Image (cartoon, rainbow, N blue to C red):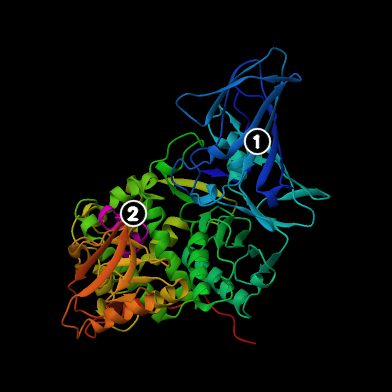
Amino acid sequence: MRTLRTFLLVVVAASLSAQTIRIRVDATDAPQKRLHAHLVIPVKAGALTLYYPEWIPGEHGPTGPVMNLTGLVFTANGNALRWMRDPVNMYAYHLEIPSGATSLDVDLDYLDPVGTGQFSAGGSLTPRLGLISWNAVLLYPAGAKSSDELMFDASLKLPSGWKYATALTATSTSGDEIHFEPISLTHLVDSPVLAGVNLKRVSLSSASPFPHTIDIAADSDAAMNTPDDFAASYGRLVDEARAIFGAEHFRHYDWLVTLSNSVEHFGLEHHESSDDRTAENELAEEQRRRDLAGLLAHEYSHSWNGKYRRPAGLATANYDVPMQGELLWVYEGLTQYLGKLLPYRSGLWTPEYYRESAALVAAGLVNRGAGRAWRPLVDTAVAAQILYGSPEAWRSARRSTDFYDEGFLLWLDADMTIRKMTSNKKSLDDFLRHFYGGSDGDPVLKPYTFDDVVKALNDVVPNDWAGFLNQRLRSTTNAPLGGFEASGWRLVYNDTPNMQQNAIEERDDTIDASNSLGFWVDEHGRITDVIPNTPAAKAGVVPGSTLVGVNGRRYSARILRNFIRDSKTATAPMQLVFTAEDFVNVVSVDYHGGLRYPHLERIASSPDWLTELGKPRATRAPAP
């Protein structure tokens, strides 16, 4: 177990100088999408290898944006040094330090990507805001046993007038430059900085003994307007998390929320903060606020599941060591379960919305049956580093990072199994408190293995949990829907729009016809994926084509939806016209099932444990 105090007190490895590495990041050109960094690294004469961080925690792959590192200059004793990139490891740089040199000066620039990129390697800067990830602007010397042993003295200079938020502790401010307390490389990389012209801090009131803040930066001041119940609602979410886990492993927690249409959208967990990026109008629309609640709940849960407890294969010593993701169905799958549960219990989601979201997840996994026939769930976790960022085309046949959504179903099933075996006296909450609880305190890292998960489940209720998990992890049959039926609900389809699906389609001008024709259409009319053996696939519709006509009418989402609705009474097949590469294709789709949306339907003869699941656990203070 490694604590923050250990990070601060540990002695640097004997092969390195005991002095701290200094890093000064100049972000004054952030509006022009450039960051500049200057490092001073203690060295000794002889060969030296420096690494650019490659395997970034939470991104589960070799995603360090080394292609955006430019302007690299090394200087010692006042003279520029030659360097050579390793011919095999593109993230390693080799130098020869001259006699008498005790420090190495490093100057580098980081160019923010234009267009898309994966996670924090995507766009992060706009003319009015920026998310600075320290791993993007530093190098570290080889030789330390772990990143805990490398100490950094960091400072950051922002554009004039910009405000900032971070989990780091500032020791002083000089003009627009902030100096932070010396910290380990581990903690530095784990603590990004959100900054911008417009930055709003929302302090939450909760039963937690630790401060919680939602820090919001946006490209416009109006985008930061929050509903009247915003702080109170998220205060309840904090209370519900504490009621589950019983302890918090941080000194404070900051959600760093970026509202912009010009940055990459994702969530990335850190121990005392999270990097949460989404659309500029996320707070202005009810459906988007629901989406945001799911995102913030998911990333917050990672402070326990992913940061405090982390699979041993992902708890690597340094950022040049490959990660192994076979337990991502715990790391991400259980967090997906919690990312829906916490909004449900805190009232950010209604019970109906929770059920609609769960039904949509289940239907999506049913639709990937062709992929399930050859690729078990565990392989989606093992192969995460190549599945992240994989195209939507052929996803239903390939499968993608299904350890998220199928992990949700697996852990729901585990919850219901515990309830059934104990006559509802225990639930997955007991496992969560046992495995992730402990005592309040500073950030710590406590790795675990598959056997540790099995043991903790058996501590809650004895069972063949290894067999339970392995059956679900290695199955190549149908999607695991047993948790729903055990909870008193079943997956059904009818022509009533699914609440979440309908809102997403209206918001994005897309069509999810996966449960009827067998494909999805984006806002540009492009068919993103086609499910094998569905009416559309049998007719010859292919992913990547663009739908231009339906039954003699020019394509629009409304037109297609209406024709799907009317297919119940139509006698002739539906005629689709689409373009693919340089060809125009006309196909007849023999479908007459009408609109089909997924829902959960109550099983009257069974106990309603899904409603029980969503009941608040935290004690509420009486209303004034």
The label nearer to you, 1 versus 2, is: 2
Q: Secondary structure at mark 2?
A: loop
Q: Earlier in the sequence, mark 1 or mark 2?
A: 1
CA separation, marks 1 and 2?
Answer: 38 Å
Question: Would you say residue 394 sits in the magenta stretch?
Answer: yes
The foreground one among 514 and 385 is: 514
Give the number of the disc on residue 151. 1
Q: Secondary structure at mark 1?
A: strand
Q: Is residue 101 visible?
A: yes
The outermost residue toward the right is: 175
Name the residue type under label 1. Met
**Whole-percent x and y of residue 91?**
52, 32
| Residue where numbered disc 2 is placed | 400
**Whole-percent x and y of residue 34?**
66, 45
Residue at 67% over, 43% down: 35
Residue at 43% over, 69% down: 340
The foreground one among 470 and 543 is: 543
**Whole-percent x and y of residue 56?**
50, 43
The foreground one among 460 and 35 is: 35
Horizontal side of 352 relative to 53 (left or right) equals left
Magenta highlight: main SS: helix
| Mark 1 surroundings within 10 Å by alpha-carbon count, few (fewer than 14), some (14 through 19), many (20 or more) | many
| Mark 2 surroundings within 10 Å by alpha-carbon count, few (fewer than 14), some (14 through 19), many (20 or more) | many
Name the residue type under label 2. Ser
- The reply to whether dot 1 and dot 2 touch (C-beta < 8 Å) is no
Horizontal side of 431 relative to 260 (left or right) equals left
> From which residue to which does the magenta span run?
393-417
- The picture quadrant where one finds residue 506 is bottom left
Question: Would you say residue 157 sits in the magenta stretch?
Answer: no
Q: Is residue 398 above or below residue 37?
A: below
Residue at 59% over, 42% down: 136
